Image (cartoon, helix red, strand yellow):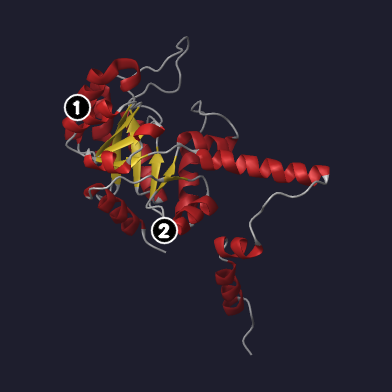
Amino acid sequence: MKSSQERRAALRLVLAGDACIHPASVHDPISARIAAEIGFEAGMLAGSVASLSVLGAPDFILLTLSEFAETARRIGRGCDLPLICDADHGYGNALNVMRTVEELETAGVAGMTIEDTILPRPFGVDRIELISKAEGVAKMKAAVAARMDPTLCIFARTSALGPGGMEEALERVRAYQPTGVDGVFVTGVKTRADVEALAQAARLPLLLGGVPKDILDRAFLGAHGVRVALQGHQPFAAAVAAISSAMRALRDGSEMPQIASTQTMDRLTRTAQWSARTKTYLTPDD
């Protein structure tokens, strides 16, 4: 197994390169191992997916920091995939952000995003609202100050494109870059012109979320400073569909859909490794 520092170094190589990667959306050790086998350079644990897998609840900021950090820790101990975590708003103000960084760093993540959205949803509000730019800057500075391992990647995340438009987004990008963060994560990009405008303002690597399929061109994104672009979180929904189909087949007595072979399950659960340990440590000496 690679150490946390080795996984963080691998993520930093991505940031320092000239290509854009698509991280795998993962939610548990098995999904992360599958992603690593397939060849993904990094994994992404979204707050929405963590809420689904831990609570069976939508992304209404119901998950606690301890629940999220434990999910990240379980994924990290299960494979060598560098894990980026969506740490939402840092679970509170700038002091809570510092606690969040401490917990997730200890959990072994390679990187995390801290966003400037007002969360959870305030009473009487039905749209995305942002904290002030000054508070956003303070949160990013607090996040950087809280990390103990300088190889841990911290990304400032802004949702300003939605409620504020491009000018507000560019102001936020410019304001967050001097705080010591390692990149800026922007959600809500819709066009190539949006990417080009962000690239002109960015001095740090860009990360994008919610990118339309028609501009998920890795060559174009890489040439404009985008190092990470999310493709969505379809694997969790696909897993739900597969489980539903298998359970329905068992209930109805119908034909079972395709399932993982015993060999695949043994490989992903590292059965051979555990069997060898059993022989070494649970078998009496002759």
Q: Contact, CB < 8 Å: mark 1 with mark 2? A: no
- The kind of secondary structure element at disc 1 is helix
Residue at left offset 22%, top offset 38%: 224
Pick whichever, 134 or 79, lies toward us: 79
112 to 277, vertically: above or below: above
- The kind of secondary structure element at disc 2 is loop
Q: Circle 2 is placed at which residue position?
A: 80
Q: Position of residue 133 (x, y in %)?
A: 24, 21
Residue at left offset 60%, top offset 43%: 239
Residue at left offset 70%, top offset 49%: 257
Figure quadrant of residue 214: top left
Q: State left or right for residue 263 relative to residue 205.
A: right
Can you see residue 149?
no
Q: Residues within 10 Å of mark 1 (few under 14, many from 20)?
A: some
Pick whichever, 128 or 124, lies toward us: 128
Separation (CA) of disc 1 from disc 2: 34 Å
Q: Circle 1 is placed at which residue position?
A: 175
Q: Position of residue 201 (x, y in %)?
A: 17, 30
**Image quadrant for the C terminus?**
bottom right
